[in-house]
Image (spheres, helix red, strand yellow):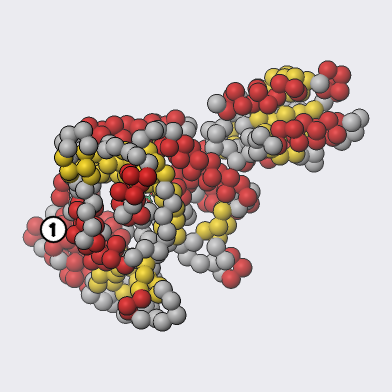
Amino acid sequence: MEKLVSLCKRRGFVFQSSEIYGGLNGAWDYGPLGVELLRNIKQEWWGEMTRRTNVEGIDSAILMHPRVWEASGHVENFTDPMVDCRQCKARFRLDILFEETSLKKRKEVLRAADPEKFGGQLTEETVAAEFMALADRDPAAVLTSLSCPGCGNRDTFTEARKFNLMFKTFVGPVEDSGNVVYLRPETAQGIFVNFLNVQSAGRQKVPFGIAQIGKAFRNEINTKNFLFRTREFEQMEMQFFVKPGSDDEWFEYWRNERMNWFTGLGMSKDTLRWHRHAPDKLAHYAKDAYDIEYLFPFGWGEVEGVHNRTDFDLTRHEEYSGKSMKYFDEAAKEKFTPYIIETSAGASRSFMAFLVNAYHEEEAPTAEGGSEKRVVMKFHPRLAPVKAAVFPLVNRDGMPEAARAIEEALRGRLATFYDDSGAVGRRYRRQDEIGTPWCITVDTQTLADRSVTVRERDSMVQERVASEKLLSYLTDKIG
Ligand code: GAP
């Protein structure tokens, strides 16, 4: 992770927000290459959704009527239990505090709680399970035995309290409780409340879906692991409205489609897995829920959820707004509240997963016949922020002019980069590090027959291609 974070900063993928002021936790800025990579990921997702005649797009407002968040359950339930340290005033999420307790400490806590039961030899699994069970049953008792990770003092935690993760602000000039609005913690609600607008404007029939990409905000207590858990992030959500009874089939359909999207963009299958929510851990509205998890350097983490949300959302909005959210099926002459199959991906989290997936260190041959270490970002060509770099072999004999002309001709159609500084080997390394799939070199032969060498990033194999055919050669390969 450290290597990746440092590459991201050095090469302009991601910068810390407000860095010159010491940074702001949980917020990140996307640099020139990062913004291109993120746009490509979002573009791939958007195209994948809206290429279907039964999926419409939408871009709803971040600020919504506060009743939306009462209906959705966020005002009441979108909370994390948290504790404060009385000494150093640091705040911690209770579940994370427990999760991060060491094995040794867990054993100690169990032995103190029940010396007879936990006095003997215990396996790691038993300690883990029994400790979490005790923490669930009696969190206060466990807390008294733990030390604050901030200042190291023991028995300094306050009682656990619920902390709502929504950011609050006020509409208009008066900061009054009647004017409270929230920054949306998910894009999904903007879709639910527009269900009938989109259905009638798009003349859609159930089953159909609505897709949206946009910012979401959560006042996470613990932001961590770079872009994994941040306070401001982007989501790519699609809600698919189906007739009750057909929901299980659509659920399986979308699970399949979503996993294929990640693998189709170059993620290796052994770094992705499904995590099914246990029945007792399902959200109150969900009938079934799976997460797509990616194997990050710090372990498995969710990148997308595929959930069967039943008719919960539309029913609640009908109840809270007093407006019917039912669909009228013309053919069957019947009214019903559709079930919703949700696919909810984090754009920022997927961005990080694609970065991790692309990062490789390997040996590459040098011009002198030796080898050297290269860092290469093996992005899928459609995701790569720069598609082709163009180099003159040397800065004389008309090669720079010819290379410039080629680069300019490609630029209108593809993201390109011109580089004439340093040895060609070094220029290859610089492009490998940002994941440019093709490097085009203008050499002496180009001046004679207008052909160039095209070097492919992963295999490092070079081919000669006529410069007039470069654009179609590259676009064919990108697909
Ligand atoms: N509408 C359902 C929903 O929002 P979620 O599991 O809370 O479900 C969906 O979020 C996705 O949004 C997650 O899989 C993750 O990729 C992303 N996400 C959620 N919280 C995030 C955070 N604090 N930072 C970055 N991404 C986040």
The 10 Å Cα crowd at callout 1, few under 14, some 14 to 19, many 20 or more, is: few
391 to the left or right of 475: right
Which residue extends farthest left?
A: 116
Q: Position of residue 283 (x, y in %)?
A: 21, 52
Task: Name the kind of residue labelled 1 in the image.
Answer: Gly
Q: Residue shown at 58%/71% (left/top)? A: 21
Residue 133 image point, x, y percent: 16, 57
Image side of residue 300 versus residue 410, left or right: left
Give 424 or 472, whichever is nearer the viewer. Answer: 472
Q: Is 123 located above or below residue 157 in the figure?
A: above
**Which residue is at 24% across, 61% downward?**
321
Figure check: 408 above or below 82: above
* Left or right of 323, for residue 455: right
Q: What percent of the width, then of the height, locates residue 479?
A: 55, 26
Q: Nearer the viewer, residue 12 or 104?
A: 12
Above or below: residue 140 compared with residue 110: below
- Residue sitting at x 90%, y 33%: 396
Q: What element carries label 1?
A: loop
Residue furthest to the right = 397
**Residue 317 position within the rendered picture, expressed as x and y whole percent measured from the top left:** 24, 57
Q: Residue visible at 36% across and 76% down?
A: 179
Side (left or right) of 160 relative to 387: left
Q: Which of 230 and 7 is in front in this view?
A: 230
Query: What residue is pinned by disc 1?
Result: 119
Q: In this orientation, does residue 327 appear?
A: yes
Q: Quadrant of residue 473?
A: top right
